[in-house]
Amino acid sequence: MTEIRTAVELRHPPERVWRALTDRELLPKWFASVEPRPSSISRFELRPVDLAELPELIVIELVELDPPHRMVLRWPEEGRSTRLECELAPTAEGCRLTVVQAGDAEPWLPDDPDGRAECHRRLLESRLPAVLDWLAFQEVDLPAETAVLGAVAAGRPGSGRRSRRRLVAALAVLALALGAGVVGAGLAGGRSGDAPSGAPAPVASTAPGTPPGTATPTGPAPDAGPTPTPPGRQTRPSTPARSTSTTTTAAAANPPKTGQPRLTARYSTVSSRLLGYQGEVVVTNEGTAAATGWTVVVTLSGSAQVAAASGAEGYRQEGQQVTFTGAPLAADRSATIRFDVERDTTLTQKRPTSCVVGPEPCAGL
């Protein structure tokens, strides 16, 4: 009787591996899509994904289930019933997965035993670990600053010292930056108090001949008559000062031109999980006038849906497009939208496929 046995050491806990073996949303990402048979609660249809060594459609029967340790399946191949056993055993670094396929009651010999064995190795040594690594990444959802402090506190050999050195270096750079800002501000203040180049020197407040400590009279100076003109120097008639009322009237007659709003937006993924994520869009009015309102349209992937949103006056979803609308936005002001997305099954980074505010694309995508 032919038996195909494959065992792999996985750096993941048995619970995570069990999830990848049994979750209907995860199975198509590394093995096959699965659908229950309408007539039975223990029979399912498997459609392998890009596996030429297996039939296009396999009807399996669930024989035994002991989560997260053991699972036994049965399915017919070439007119004979075969039995597939999956066993998980915990190890110091994760777990060991052993998969054995053999004849159920009669001898079974596949057309290409070596090809079938290679198929099993490819599934368990390449495809499955990739999904497990992705699952592990999804389960860790820490802000960047928390991750840095966590690495310092973890005390792992070498990593803690390196993280502490990086943290001290970052704090030193921050202190230098703050000091430079303070010095720059002081220099700017000092320059603002100096007389500008080419300006006349300030006039002394003490009149000639006034003893020190004597208050200078504040009344109008006596009329000393016209100032004599030195020989050879021509005099120009003085220009009368423009009255305040004239200036005000001119400004009222020629008001400044009204500015224009200019809306931009930036997208970021706040957090992610297995089948969803939380997205954020910050809308900013970089113009010189208030915007009467704003519209942000994001396009989701597949059958993903927005379950909740905040920061917008309202939103609606039509197919894959979600439209958010907001209130008037003053110049140099921002508004932040956050929305929760469910039923997103992509393995890549969790985010919309596109985002626009008006006609402008959002930054960050």
Image (spheres, rainbow, N blue to C red):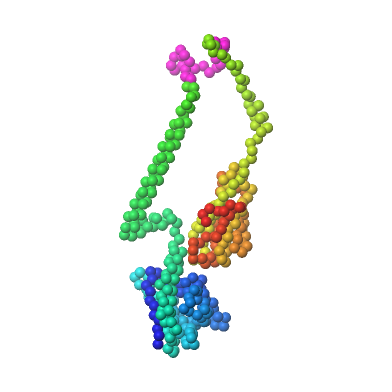
Q: Residue furthest left?
A: 157
In the displayed structure image, the side of residue 68 where residue 362 appears, left or right: right
Residue located at (44% from left, 36% from top): 185
Percent of width and height locating residue 40: 54, 82
In the displayed structure image, the side of residue 164 where residue 23 appears, left or right: right
Between 252 and 27, which is closer to the camera in this rendering?
27
Percent of width and height locating residue 84: 44, 81
Residue located at (65% from left, 35% from top): 255
Quadrant placement of the N terminus:
bottom left
Looking at the rendering, which quadrant does residue 307 occupy?
A: bottom right
User: Taking 198 as reference, is 161 above or below it?
Assistant: below
Between 312 and 28, which is closer to the camera in this rendering?
28
Percent of width and height locating residue 210: 46, 14
Percent of width and height locating residue 322: 60, 60
User: Taking 317 as reference, is 202 above or below it?
Assistant: above
Whether residue 251 is visible, yes or no, is yes
In the displayed structure image, the side of residue 125 where residue 268 appears, left or right: right
User: Taking 362 as reference, is 227 above or below it?
Assistant: above
Residue located at (45% from left, 31% from top): 191
Give yes or no for residue 212 being in the magenta stretch: yes
Looking at the rendering, which quadrant does residue 211 occupy?
A: top left
What's the magenta bit mostly, secondary-structure-wise?
Answer: loop
Whether residue 23 is visible, yes or no, is no
Residue range (magenta)? 202-228
Q: Residue furthest right?
A: 253
Give yes or no for residue 172 being in the magenta stretch: no
